[in-house]
Image (cartoon, rainbow, N blue to C red):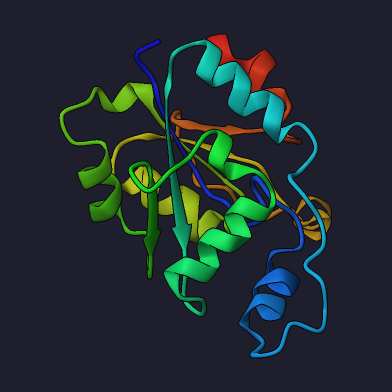
Amino acid sequence: MDRLFLFDFDDTLANFSIYNSWVLKQPVRIFPPIGSTIKGAREVLDFLKGESDELVMVTMNMILDAGVKWEKLERVGMRRWFDEDNVHMVKEKTPDLFRRLTAGRDPSRCYMVGNSLKHDIVPALGAGIKAVYIPRPLIKRLLPARLPRSKDLTVLRDIGQLIEAYDGL
Ligand SMILES: [Mg+2]
């Protein structure tokens, strides 16, 4: 109800991010974009909406212009939950960015959900908010990284687990 969920996009909500960025960057569209939302992601976003939590997307955008990045988001149906007001396309995710995005809120009710320790989890914990780490792609699960030691960190096997974990987050 009073929670704020910040979501990474690539490899957290949607598949084939590198391929699709490459396809959309080509001057001539020969190759089709592929993939879709990650299994369970749509249900999680609908669930959080149903809880009246606030959703924000924080996505790195190094190589596409904002219009093309939006094309990438729209192609997998992100307009259902996100628009220009709650999407932040950034060059870098830093503790300072997360502090700004969660300013005025109880940090223990703010969660960054992402697949990258470096880009999502470490800066979120650095900002004093909570973090939900969902290792992807598979190789990250097979070769587990050393996790930051923090009571504010939750690790999930897949995004769908967020619904079961919700009450305890
Ligand atoms: Mg990602």
Q: Specify whether 80 is left or right of 88.
A: right
- Comparing 48 with 155, the one in front is 48
Q: At which x and y percent is residue 71?
A: 58, 62
Is 55 situated above or below 53?
Answer: below
Q: How many marks?
A: 0
Residue positioned most to the bottom: 27
Q: At which x and y percent is residue 5?
A: 44, 31
Q: At which x and y percent is residue 86?
A: 37, 41
Quarter occupied by the N terminus: top left
Which residue is pictured at 53% across the width and 49% down the height?
8
Is 76 situated above or below 62?
Answer: above
**Quadrant of the image occupied by residue 80:** top right
Does residue 169 appear in the picture of this structure?
Answer: no
Does residue 150 appear in the picture of this structure?
Answer: yes
**Quadrant of the image occupied by residue 42:** top right
- Comparing 54 with 131, the one in front is 54
Q: At which x and y percent is residue 32?
A: 82, 72
Which residue is pictured at 65% across the width and 43% down the height?
77
Q: Specify whether 2 is left or right of 55.
A: left
Which residue is pictured at 52% across the width and 19% down the height?
49
